[in-house]
Structures are given as structure tokens and as C-alpha cells.
Amino acid sequence: MPTKDVDEFFRRLSAADAEPKGELNYVNEFTLTVAVVLSAQATDAGVNKATEKLFKIADTPEKMLALGEARVRDYIKTIGLYRNKAKNVIALCEMLISDFGGLIPQTREELVKLPGVGRKTANVVLNIAFGQPTMAVDTHIFRIGNRTGMAPGKNVDQVEDKLVKRIPKQWMQHAHHWLILHGRYVCKARKPECGNCAVKDLCRFKGKTEE
């Protein structure tokens, strides 16, 4: 996809939704980080349902740690891999308190040291909590990068690297939200709604549908 088409791609997505937002519910940087950790192999809606009551009583590392692993596990037991995730949340709280003064660090290098936090999670936190122009590549963005021809790659790291290099600076702040939402609701994995796609003419996907 030519650079001018990449620019036009995001110009159109911006025109439709100038301030896209993530769909995870949170109240501060800490609860955002926990929510993203819990969202691995789970839906945002499922995470929101599980954390609604949890975040009302535990919105800091200290409060979450005071709950203990067993009680955290009870709150999130409707989420996949909840046992391991509860263990990671408690370990994450312990490290935040001991190494970071209870605050969420603002660099990727520090964030990925936290239990349960990988590169994608770190990029989401940096973007949403701290306004950094990062690209968190999930399954939707990986699919769009390859399907459209904008950033073809065999793994998420390759797609992330190409997107960061190719997306014009003016669009980077919201780019990962635009791509996730586009992949979730329009450029779907099994039945892409090409007929409702605002960037259909820019896309290189050979399997376009008309419906």
C-alpha cells in the first residue's frame, strides 16, 4: 500500500471517529494495566463484567494485594485462565509496590518486567494511560496489516515495526484504536463487511465481499 494510501486510510477512519476509545473499563493507570493483563485470550466485555465489582474495592496495588490471590480469583473466575491471571495480578502488585512506589511505570522496558505484562500490554498502557504513540498489535491489527497490504508480516513484531514506520505521525496517537475497532466491527476475520468499509478501495485484500 503506497504511503499516500496509508495517509488516506487513517484520514477516513479519523473522519468517522476522531477520538476513538478502547472498550476496556478502568478508573486509573493501575486498573487499566490490570484490565489489559486480564484481557489476554478474553473479550473486553467479559473482562468489564468481571472487574466491575473488583475495581470498586481494589483500585490501587495496595488494596488489590490486601484482597489476596484467592479473593481476586473469585472476582475474575468467569475469565479464561483466571487462576494464572489472579496469580499474576498479585505478583504485579507486589512488584509495583516494591520496585515502583506503587505507580505504573511509563517506559516499555519497565512495564514488561511486571508479571503478566508483555509487549502488547505495555504498548496499550503507554498509549492509553500516558498518551505515547505506540502500536499494540493484537489479532485484529495483525489481520488488517496483512489483509490490506499496509504492513504484511509473519508475526506481530514484524507488523508492529512496519506500522510504526509507515503510519504518518499525525495519526499514530489513535492508530491502534482505529485499527482494532475496524477489525472488530468491519474487517472481521471470517466475514469481513467490505460493503460497509470506508477504505475498501485502498485495501489489497483479494477476498473482498460485496455484502
Image (cartoon, helix red, strand yellow):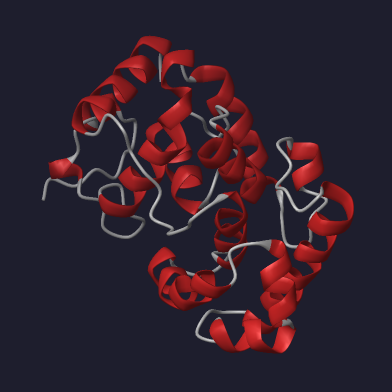
Residue at coordinates 49% horizontally, 71% vertically from top-left? 56
Is residue 85 found left or right of 145 in the rendered image? Answer: right
Split into 4 quadrants, where in the image is the N terminus? Answer: top left
Residue at the extreme right: 98
Residue at coordinates 47% horizontally, 27% vertically from top-left? 173
Q: Nearer the viewer, residue 194 or 97?
A: 97
- In this rendering, the answer to whether 49 lies above or below 183 is below
Q: Kindly indicate the quadrant of the structure image that contains residue 52.
A: bottom left
Is residue 64 found left or right of 15 in the rendered image? Answer: right
Q: Residue 63, image x and y in percent?
A: 67, 70
- In this rendering, the answer to whether 54 lies above or below 118 is below
Q: How many marks?
A: 0
Q: Nearer the viewer, residue 32 or 158?
A: 32
Q: Residue 189, image x and y in percent?
A: 36, 56
Residue 64 in view, yes or no? yes
Is residue 185 found left or right of 109 in the rendered image? Answer: left
Q: Residue 191, image x and y in percent?
A: 26, 58
Q: Residue 149, image x and y in percent?
A: 43, 30
Residue at coordinates 21% horizontally, 26% vertically from top-left? 201
Is residue 71 found left or right of 168 in the rendered image? Answer: right
- In this rendering, the answer to whether 161 lies above or below 169 is below
Q: Kindly indicate the quadrant of the structure image that contains residue 210.
A: top left
Residue 149 in view, yes or no? no
Q: Kindly indicate the quadrant of the structure image that contains residue 188.
A: bottom left
Residue at the extreme top: 4
